[in-house]
Image (cartoon, rainbow, N blue to C red):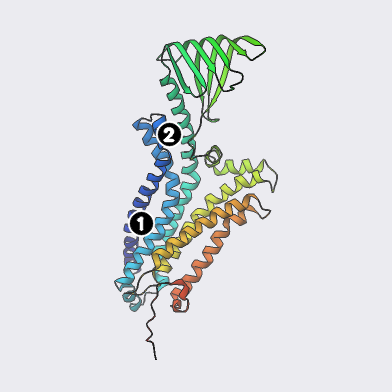
Amino acid sequence: MPLILYSYLAAEILAPFFASLLILNGVLFTGRIMQLIDLIFSMNISLADFIRLCFFISPKLLLFSIPMASSIAVILAFARLVNDNEIIALKAAGVSLYKMLPPVIIFAACTALSTGFIATKFIPAGSLAMHNLFVKLATEKINNGIQAKRFSDNTGNLILYVNKVNLETKQWQGVYLSDLRDKNHPITILAQGGSLTPHMEDMYLSMNLHNGSLHRENSTITQTINFRDYTINVPVQAPKSISSQNLSKSSMTQTTLLRSAAKFKAGSNKRAHFLSEYHKRLALPAGCFILTLLGFSLALRSRPGQRNSALPLGIGFFLLYYISLTMAENLSIDTIIPVGLIMWLPNFIFGGISTFIIFITANEKWQDFHLLNPFRVSNKRSTS
């Protein structure tokens, strides 16, 4: 009996879970791509690089979509069982709410572990890969934009002219460069050769020039400097929707975050900055587990024929949890309270709420808590 029951409940949960996950990822992916649309068109991304970009941004989408799909799936599955009177039939057969919990707990544990693996492994790897992809695309954009005997302004305020380009080695011959980054003191550089070198980790490009001269002038003097090697560093700008600070923090592993935090004294903002990210990656999987169990208890509160408030309540609790976690992350930077305690506080609060609702649902005491069901319709007849 338990095995058959658990298999049946698991099948009821998995179908809406995968459907919800597909829909949520589609919506989130569309919104994310719209934020990166400027990058896609400005850098003329190829199909292969576009697929890589989609793959690299998917872990952050799953970090949000898996917990939400997990909660929605449990709510939809048990709400259907309630509406079809199957829960009443199970209770009549002696199956209590606690006997229905094991498959839900196993499912919640699986989605929580998936969320934890994504948060601690996939997101750092994906962020680092996206970091390197930006540098690669910027390098290709400059190299492809540099054509022999034509001026190129792909490097912003650096106007480049190359007499000859080796298409295989990407080496330049006969280089003219106008550096207009300082409008008051423009620089003109003439060099026999040059090349472009990407620096993936620090996210900048080096323009290496050889055997040339640098000419600088202002209103009073003119300066000429001959050089054998001269390097100009060009920073790679990430899309506006992604700050360099967040990109750097999200690309760190858990071990790297702890090592970075250990470099600063206790109570400092920089230490809290790294510790909050460390604890957030661990708190989110626990939150996924809690919200899934909360969805289970909310779905069983309804009655056949009544308007089911479980889904809007579940989504409301889900959004409230993420808002609370974001607030905790912001507070952890500017407070003397331990970062770990603040980051795990939303889990403690929602864990208590989930335990409380499961208890009153198992003992069928939800009638005494009208606030938990705003759509409840009283069955009492009015008397004159």
Split into 4 quadrants, where in the image is the N terminus? bottom left
Q: Residue at x 37, y 34 (%)?
A: 50
- Given residues 273 and 4, the one toward you in this image is 273
Q: CA distance from mark 1 to mark 2?
A: 33 Å
- Given residues 228 and 162, the one toward you in this image is 162
- Given residues 123 and 180, the one toward you in this image is 180
Give the labeled residue for mark 2: 39
Residue 219 visible, this orientation: yes
Q: Residue at x 56, y 47 (%)?
A: 277
Q: Residue at x 43, y 65 (%)?
A: 313
Please say if 67 is above or below 141. Answer: below
Q: Could you classify mark 2 by the number of other residues whose Cα lies within 10 Å: few (under 14), some (14-19), or many (20 or more)?
A: some
Name the kind of residue labelled 2 in the image.
Leu
Please say if 185 is above or below 53. Answer: above
- Given residues 330 and 187, the one toward you in this image is 187
Q: Please tell me whether mark 1 or mark 2 is closer to you in this view.
A: 2
Q: Could you classify mark 1 by the number of other residues whose Cα lies within 10 Å: few (under 14), some (14-19), or many (20 or more)?
A: many
Q: Residue at x 44, y 64 (%)?
A: 293
The x, y position of residue 15, in whole percent, is: 31, 58
Name the kind of residue labelled 1 in the image.
Phe
Give the labeled residue for mark 1: 17
The answer to whether marks 1 and 2 mark residues whose Cβ atoms lie closer than 8 Å is no
Q: Quadrant of residue 141?
A: top left
Please say if 141 is above or below 302. Answer: above
